[in-house]
Image (cartoon, helix red, strand yellow):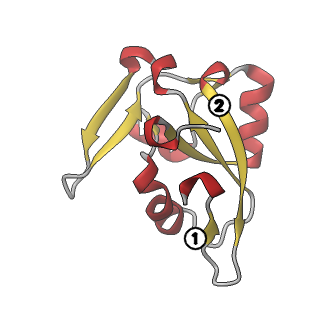
Amino acid sequence: MVDVSIMAYKICTENEWRQLQETGRFFGSADDLRDGYVHLSARGQVARTASKFFAGRTDLVLLAINPDRLGSALRWEASESGTLYPHLYAPLPLDAVVTATPLLLGPDGHHILPAEFG
């Protein structure tokens, strides 16, 4: 079982996940490219990120990422609210992805997180 407390997470589309598998690197979504880094989330931020930025989407995959494989390109930076988020200033390498789990929508319209989230 993956220790979710130490992972970073990326919510991406199924197409973006396929691209990462095919090329070995993911340069980011349109939002990531606009901002100059790949947006990641800590465990406690995934549900909020999903509901705020991906509400109603049915084509999503949650990637659990080993932060030790990202090196100094991973930085924890404050958002406008002061909350620290992990940002990756490099392409996401496939070998850093520990698991990839489809994010399904529940009957209430919210995404169902993997069982490891509790």
- Is any atom of residue 116 visible in this view? yes
Point out which mark residue 94 bears. Answer: none
Helix, strand or loop at mark 2: strand
- Going 71% across and 48% down the picture, which residue do you hit? 101
Label 1 secondary element:
loop
From the top left corner, tell me how far across and down residue 100 is, in percent.
71, 41
Instruction: Give the mark count.
Output: 2
Q: Residue at position x 32%, y 29% from top?
A: 75
Residue on which the image places disc 2: 98
Q: How crowded is the residue under tag 1: few (<14 C-alpha within 10 Å), some, or many (20+)?
A: some
Where is 18 relative to 110, above or below?
above
User: Residue drawn at (53%, 27%), measured in percent from left and top?
Assistant: 66
Callout 2: few (<14), some (14-19), or many (20+) C-alpha neighbours within 10 Å?
Answer: few
Tag 1: amino acid: Ala
Note whether 11 is above or below 111 in the view shown. Answer: above
Does any portion of residue 114 appear in the rendered image?
no
Give how far apart the Cα atoms at labels 1 and 2 are: 24 Å
What amino acid does circle 2 point to?
Val
The quarter of the rendered structure image containing the N terminus is top right
Find disc 1 in the rendering and name its residue.
55
**Is 82 displayed left or right of 63 in the figure?**
left
Estimate the x, y position of residue 113 in percent, counting from the top left. Answer: 61, 60
Residue 44 x, y percent position in the rendering:
41, 55
Q: Nearer the viewer, residue 50 or 67?
A: 67
Q: Which sits earlier in the primary sequence, circle 1 or circle 2? A: 1
The C terminus lies in quadrant: bottom right
The quadrant in which residue 54 appears is bottom right
Give the farthest residue toward the left: 82
8 lies left or right of 59: left
The residue under the point 77% across, 28% down is 21
Looking at the image, do the residues carrying marks 1 and 2 touch, with CB atoms under 8 Å apart? Answer: no
